[in-house]
Image (tube, coloured by chain):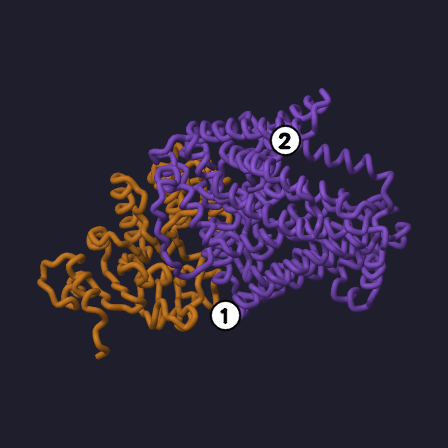
Chain colours: A orange, B purple
Amino acid sequence: MIEVEGFTKSYDGLAAVSDLSFAVQAGEILGLVGPNGAGKTTTLRAIAGILRPTRGRITVAGHELEREPVAAKLALAYVPDTPHPYDLLTVGEHLRFTALAYRIEDSEARAGPLLAELELLEKRDALASTLSRGMQQKLAIACAFLREPRAILLDEPLTGLDPRGIRDMRESIRRRAGAGAAILISSHLLELVEKLCHRVLILHRGARLALGTLDEIRAAAAIHRDATLEEAFFAITERGPSPPS
Amino acid sequence: MNDALLFLALRLRRNRLRQFARGLRRPKKAIGLLLWIALLGLLVYVQVRTRSAQARTPPEMVFALFGFLLLASVLNGLVQRGLAFLPADVDFLFPGPFSRRSLVLYRVLTLYPFSLLSGAVLYLFLVVSPAEPLPGLAAFLLAQLCALHIQTAVALLAVFLSERVFRRLRRGAQLLGAVLGVGIVFLLVLATSARGGSGRALAALADSPVARILLFPAAAAARVVAAPGLSEAATPLAALLATAAGTLALVLALDVRFFEASLSTSARLATLLSRARRGVPPGTLPEGGAVRSLSAPRLGLFRGAGAIAWKNLVAVRRSGRVLFTGCCFSLLFALPAVLAGRGRPGGAEATGPFALLLVGILPFLMQGYLAFDFRRDADHLAELKSLPVPPLAMAAAQVAVPWLLALSLQALLLLALALLGAVGPGSLALAAAAFPATALACLASANLAFLLFPTRAPAGGTRPNPAGFVLPFFLLCATLLPAVGIYALFDSSEARPAVALGAAILAQYGIDLLLLAVVGEVFRRLDPSTEVR
């Protein structure tokens, strides 16, 4: 569903991400982890069509982003790490705008249950500027989920959510994956990634250090079989990139 | 335009108007609006009253104005590189299923209302006794749209520049823009002077083939305004319409991948907007790169509330560019008036009081450059309130640094004027006694206005500060009024002028202290969690 091949992004000759390749299949949740400055947000923004790759190819739902950006974006939803809703639009108007932009016919029928699921129903007529940080995050997620996208990019989706919100969001993400969406989550919450994701991609200084299931990550880290993702993460990132084989 | 983008543009405008109307229920906002209406009414009244006595607007003035606006739009486009969007636009529109062309059209169309309104305001205040008012107004509006389209086209084309070339060009464009602005002001002043030599030169320039081609919208607008009848205005007006349509078509035809350049441009614009809404000019943006950390002096003066003044002094130290701009501004502001006065009967003696007045009001005109106070701390008001500093001490510490800066600039100017022989020892003594009081009144008023309408940058905020320029102006007038009254009282009782002035100045110092106490009290009562927008 999401295919990234040889993705490189450079700024003034300095590579933020270099030669990154991976794929996320339909129904799969891939966790993207790495220290600050590893290139996670750059990767997500490139897949969302905001940044243009210096080299490489990105395909979403069979549409190459470079050649068919509109078709690729129709299949995609991107939730950034810091939500910036329109402060002069209400929650309901955000959903209506999303429905118009993505040509959703039954948006009204979808909006009610979605707002209830995200505990935003009572805030339907509230201006976004009056929402708390967590509510704004939920609004961004509601706009993303409204269109039932085939590929979902979530950058730190749980920031600002309360414990119940975090639990509900985890379930919501699982349900979307169960319905066939390919989901790519960037997060520093390694415990969450371990519980939620089918596979994990570890990035460090713009390079791929490891990609695979938790067992495969443990094997790559060369540590014991019961190690947590956190232990494997530190073992891999503190060791640095492996020499090319 | 795309249905979703049209919905977004209309709904944002409707909600903005609704929110503005709802906000008028709050007394502070209603008073702010009334002050604006009063000022606009005054300006319109003065304009209408003096119209009959004024000569018809010379077309070269229209040419100079739009020539400047067109060149400024080219420079502005170069400085921008990529189009500036709101942070919410970046989140919702960039990853959305919109073609680049529809996003460019959305951005341009959402800027139309401001362009058209500014064109109408320029027309109202600039054009006197036009033969054909409606074509003249239409020409102003169309010329404004042409400038907007040209700026957009240049901003899109500038995306192709490398980062290094762009940085160099930006510095050059900013310098050229400043020189151009000053030049145009001088030309306009000279063009409207009795001598009229430069006016003739401008007229000749407007008629030259090169200007007609390169600055076509400016030349066409000038011809429409100068046209004696509708039939003479029709051809240049139609050409302007075609130019506006053509430049829009050019903008839409450019298929430029602008997202990446727009990210940094939009972030820069968001910072500029947040600062402008607090009255801090664009030049005060921190310059990039590492700086040496400064240690606080071991003086008791910089303990407690003094630490706030030290923090502001550090900001002054790192704002060399804005202070340089401020110095240039103050020199440009005062010296031409003195030089122009030298040729008049009475010479320097006649211009002395005028020059003194100009230097005296400088802190008000330059208050944006001097905003090293509460206005710079809009995002840190909660932290400031948590400090163990009494409100009055906080107010005094915040106003201290801009006050000292204002006095330094005034002292420099007075020195220059004294060297030019424009002011005598008596005037200098009067300035030394009065300027600290008036400068303090000005800066305390500006801070009071800010604390009454505190603003910071919300996520996608472009709302103007309702206090803006008007409230500090009215507050300043109100604080100066008692001292003026005392002077008038002493003067009418035939006291010596020195006694009347002394009493007025002493009264002003007393009022300043009261004003500082009010600033402190307003700060104490301020709730940053609900009142800072």
Confirm whether circles 2 and 1 share one chain: yes
Residue A183 horizontal/vertical position (percent): 32, 56
The image shows residue B493, relative to residue A129, as above or below, that is above
Tell which residue pokes out farthest to the top in this image.
B493
Tell which residue pokes out farthest to the bottom in this image.
A245
In space, the residues marked 2 and 1 are separated at their CA atoms by: 48 Å
Q: Amino acid at mark 2?
A: Cys
Q: What residue is at 47 percent from the left and 49 percent from the top?
A: B88
Query: Chain letter of disc 2?
Result: B
Q: What residue is at 42 percent from the left and 35 percent from the top?
A: B394
What residue would you read off at disc 2? B477
Decide which of tag 2 and tag 1 comes sooner along the chain. Answer: 1
The image shows residue B362, relative to residue B386, as above or below, that is below
Question: Within 10 angstroms of label 2, few (less than 14), some, or many (20 or more) residues?
Answer: some
SS at badge 2: helix
Question: Within 10 angstroms of label 1, few (less than 14), some, or many (20 or more) residues?
Answer: few
Can you see residue B22? no
Residue B26 horizontal/vertical position (percent): 53, 26
Horizontal side of residue B193 vs B324, given as left or right: right
Residue B353 horizontal/vertical position (percent): 71, 40
Residue B483 horizontal/vertical position (percent): 63, 27
Query: Chain letter of disc 1?
Result: B
Q: Amino acid at mark 1?
A: Arg
Horizontal side of residue B476 vs B303, given as left or right: right
Residue situated in front as seen by the camera: A43 or B288 = B288
Horizontal side of residue A104 vs B472, given as left or right: left
The image shows residue A176, relative to residue B360, as above or below, that is below
What residue would you read off at disc 1? B164
